[in-house]
Amino acid sequence: MITITPTIEGNYQIIRLKGRLDSTTSPELEEYLEANDFSKHRGVVFEMTELDYISSAGLRVLLNASKTFKKENISFLLCGIQAHVLEVFEISGFDTFLDIYPSLEEVWKE
Amino acid sequence: MTGERHRNPAGSMSLQLTLAQSDSYQSLLEGKVALLEEPLLLQEHHCFQINLILDEICTNIFENNRETENLRIDINISWKAEKITLVIEDNGIPFDPTGVDEPDTSLPLSRREAGGLGLYFVKKYTDSFTYSRIRGRNRTTVVKSLEPPNTSSTLKTS
C-alpha cells in the first residue's frame, strides 16, 4: 500500500510517500503524476521519511518523472530517504543524477 | 541479567503463489519474511533485502507469464548457520534470470532506462544466484549470507 499526500510550500509541491512503492503500488503514483499539472511550481519534492520499501518498479516511476520534470524545467528533489531504501538508489546509480537531501529542512537551506 | 541471543541454527518454511494472487503477492512475501525475523534475528535491512530479492524474482516471473495458464510459483526458504537459501520454482515459460544483461549504472539521466534493475539488485544482494530447468520447471536459487546480529551492511561492493 502506498499513501500519497501532496501539500504546497511556497513555490514547491511537496509529495509525501508512505508505505511501499512496488510493482503493485507504483502505478498509483504514476497515475497521480500524470493526472496533475506541476508546471506552476518551481520544483517538486518527494518526502520519503515514511517510505519503507521500494523496488525497481518504484524506481522506474521516479526515473520517468525525473526525465519529464527536467524537460519542463521543474526541479525534482528527493528527501528523507531511509538508509536501506537509499542503498537501492546507490546500487542503481540513481544517486548520481537525482538531487537527494537528508531532510526537508536541508532542502530549504539550499 | 542479559543473555546473548542466538540464531535458530537451521530451519525452513515454504510459500506457494498462484497467478490469482498476482495482485497481492508482495504482502504475502512480506508476511512470510516477517516470520523469519525472530528465529534468524533479522535486522531491518535484512528483511528489506530478502523482500526485495523475492519480490523482484516473482515480479519477473509474473511479467514473463502474462499468457501462461495456471502459473504457480513455489518458494522454499531455508537457513543454516549464517546463510539463508531461497529456492523459487515456477511452471512458466523457460527463462534464465541470471543471464539478463546488467544495466550500466554509470549512465547519466538522459540515457538511463530502468530495465534490468530488479535482477541486478538480486545479484548485488546475494552470494550466489543460479538457475536450472528441471522437469519442465524453472528453478532459481539464491544464497545470502547474514552477518552476525548487530553488525552493519551486507552489500557486495563488486
Image (cartoon, helix red, strand yellow):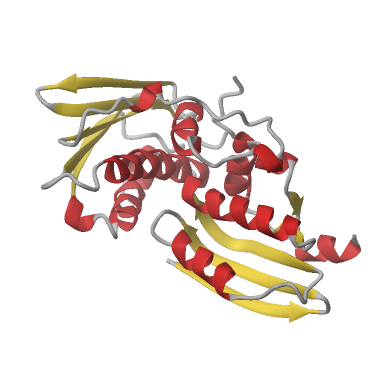
Question: Where the N terminus of chain A falls, by quadrant?
Answer: bottom left
Of residue B44 and residue A69, the one placed in the foreground of this image is A69
Residue A65's spot in the image, x, y percent? 63, 58
Residue at 49%, 45% (x, y): give it. A56
Q: Which residue is drawn at 44% across and 45% down?
A: B47
Residue B114, x across and y down, in percent: 54, 42
Q: Which of A71 and B96 is in front in this view?
A: A71
Q: In this view, does B30 lie to the left or right of A62?
A: left
- In the image, is residue B34 above or below residue A27? above
Which residue is depicted at the point 43% across and 38% down?
A: B5
In the rendered image, the quadrant that contains the C terminus of chain A is: bottom right
Residue B57: name its quadrant.
top left
Vertical relation: B28 (above or below) B58: below
When asked about the image quadrant of residue B99, the answer is: top left
Q: Is residue B75 visible?
A: yes
Q: Is residue A39 left or right of residue B120?
A: right
Q: Tell whether A34 sits left or right of B4.
A: right
Where residue A45 appears, as percent x and y from the top left, is 72, 65
Query: Which of the two residues, B36 or B135, is positioned nearer the viewer here?
Result: B135
